[in-house]
Amino acid sequence: GGALVAAGTYSVVGLFTEKRPGVVEALRGLGLEGEASFERQLFSVVVEAGPPAKLAIDAKSKTRASAELQCDNLSRPVIHGGFTLWLRDACDQNVSPPAGGLKVCVRLQPDVAPSREAAAAWAGAAEIIAAAARGSAQNLATFGSNGRADLTELRLNSLNAPAFDTSLTLHFELQPPLPGVALPPPLRVKYSDLKSLN
């Protein structure tokens, strides 16, 4: 068989069957034929989940991991609708966070400015969006003992949103960082300026 990797408690059981005819006959004569075979639990083995190896997005999250996120400054201010994240080991088993606690957040990274002339204005607008993510308690979640963290939706402050279309990249981060833990791939966020069209 292969290695025992699934977390849980396992019992090691010993099974004995007496096959020597003379002994079997002697037991039968004493009315102890039931003692010719028996099963006993010898000991138990506890297998624990391995160390954290990856951060996985739950397939039932409100935001799909494969989707390109879209938001605007008029009718669609939600940058992302929320994520359920699991801390897992190399065998895809949920694991508890380190003893000191662990948090997860998303960071918005501005894309390259559309033009040199727009660079200053674009950088300022992108910084406003990114600051909303960094400063929002909704965008920071703590892992529970079961390895689950829930990031609630993040909304755009449409009053300070940029007056031109742009795009950003959403990155997942662990606080504090855990070396060797694979994070979900970044997600694209497409922002549209609709107010200027009215």
Image: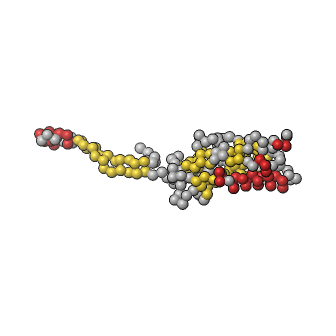
Would residue 188 be visible to someone looking at this image? Answer: no
Residue in the picture at 20% in, 42% down: 35
Query: Is 30 rendered above or below residue 47?
Result: above
Query: Residue 21's image quarter?
Result: top left
Closer-to-camera residue (45/2): 45
Q: Quadrant of the N terminus?
A: top left
Q: Name the image colouring.
A: secondary structure
x, y percentage for residue 68?
A: 70, 41
Residue in the picture at 82% in, 52% down: 122
Query: Residue 75's image quarter?
Result: top right
Closer-to-camera residue (193/13): 193
Q: Is residue 134 left or right of residue 17?
A: right
Residue in the picture at 71% in, 44% down: 78
x, y percentage for residue 11?
A: 35, 47
Would residue 126 be visible to someone looking at this image? Answer: yes
Name the outermost residue toward the bottom.
100
x, y percentage for residue 4?
A: 43, 47
Closer-to-camera residue (166/31): 166
Name the outermost residue toward the right.
117
Q: Quadrant of the C terminus?
A: top right
Q: How many marks?
A: 0
Residue in the picture at 24% in, 43% down: 38
Name the outermost residue toward the front.
159
x, y percentage for residue 52?
A: 54, 53
Q: Is residue 16 left or right of residue 137?
A: left
Closer-to-camera residue (134/5): 134
